[in-house]
Amino acid sequence: MIGKRRPLGKELKDIQIGDNYSGAKKMMDRDLLLYLGLTNDANPLYLQHDYASLTPYKKPIVPAVMLFGMVSSLVSMHLPGPGSHITHHEIIFLKSVYHNTEVYFTLEVIAKDEANQRIAMNVTGTDEKGDKVITGKLYVIPAYRPNTLTAQSLENFF
């Protein structure tokens, strides 16, 4: 990626209250295993059908933090997009999500804070049955574009 720049997402000035993005993600076993391997999380509730069958969940569930990872990905990739950063979140996981369930996420800009260069967004996620599984609020600093004239001037300086 050296020498290749990825296009940045929206800047604060380009974001309006009411802007939204929706996307779906299916919680596949391979993704779950990759996540659990990377985090070294061996919770039997996430993996073992025999154990999970003895719990109120009845079968393995997706870790809540993995669901939040999907939300974070939507922020980083779509709204506001590449270059943005979540600084604070208030997330409630309303219902467990099982393996191989598709979750539909929606992000909506609900406020702009010019003084702190950030936006507030609502997030919701629903499962295939239409049941809400996640809800909350995010505070995000959108992409920042350095002044290109200054960057070129510095390049020429050296």
Image (cartoon, rainbow, N blue to C red):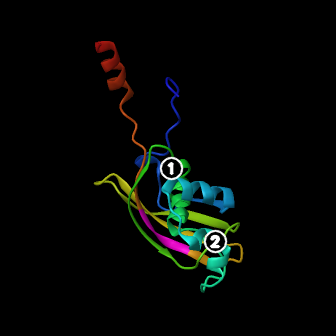
Q: Position of residue 23 (x, y in %)?
A: 64, 59
Is-magenta flag for residue 13?
no
Q: Residues within 10 Å of mark 2 (few under 14, many from 20)?
A: some
Q: Which mark is residue 76?
A: 1
Q: CA distance from mark 1 to mark 2?
A: 32 Å
Q: In the rendered image of this protein, does residue 52 appear above or below residue 105? A: below
The disc placed on residue 48 is: 2
Please state, as top left, top right, bottom left or bottom right, where the C terminus lies in the image.
Answer: top left
Secondary structure state at the residue bearing disc 2: loop
Residue 152 lies left or right of residue 57; in this view the side is left
Q: Position of residue 47 (x, y in %)?
A: 62, 68
**Which of the two labelled residues, at mark 1 and mark 2, occupies the earlier sequence position?**
2
Residue at 52% over, 59% down: 69
User: Could you tell me if residue 131 is visible in this image?
Assistant: no
**Residue 120: % across, % down:** 41, 62
Q: Would you identify the image quadrant in which residue 90 lies?
A: bottom left
**Residue 43 shows which numbered tag?**
none
Q: Residue at x 53, y 36 (%)?
A: 7
Residue 74 seen in the current view: yes
Q: Is residue 149 left or right of residue 131?
A: left
Q: Amino acid at mark 1?
A: Ser
Position above or below: 7 against 23 = above
User: Which dot, 1 or 2, sits closer to the camera?
Assistant: 2
The quarter of the displayed image where residue 126 is located = bottom right
Q: Residue at x 55, y 48 (%)?
A: 77
Looking at the image, the residue that sits furthest to the front is 50
Q: Which residues are magenta?
A: 134-138
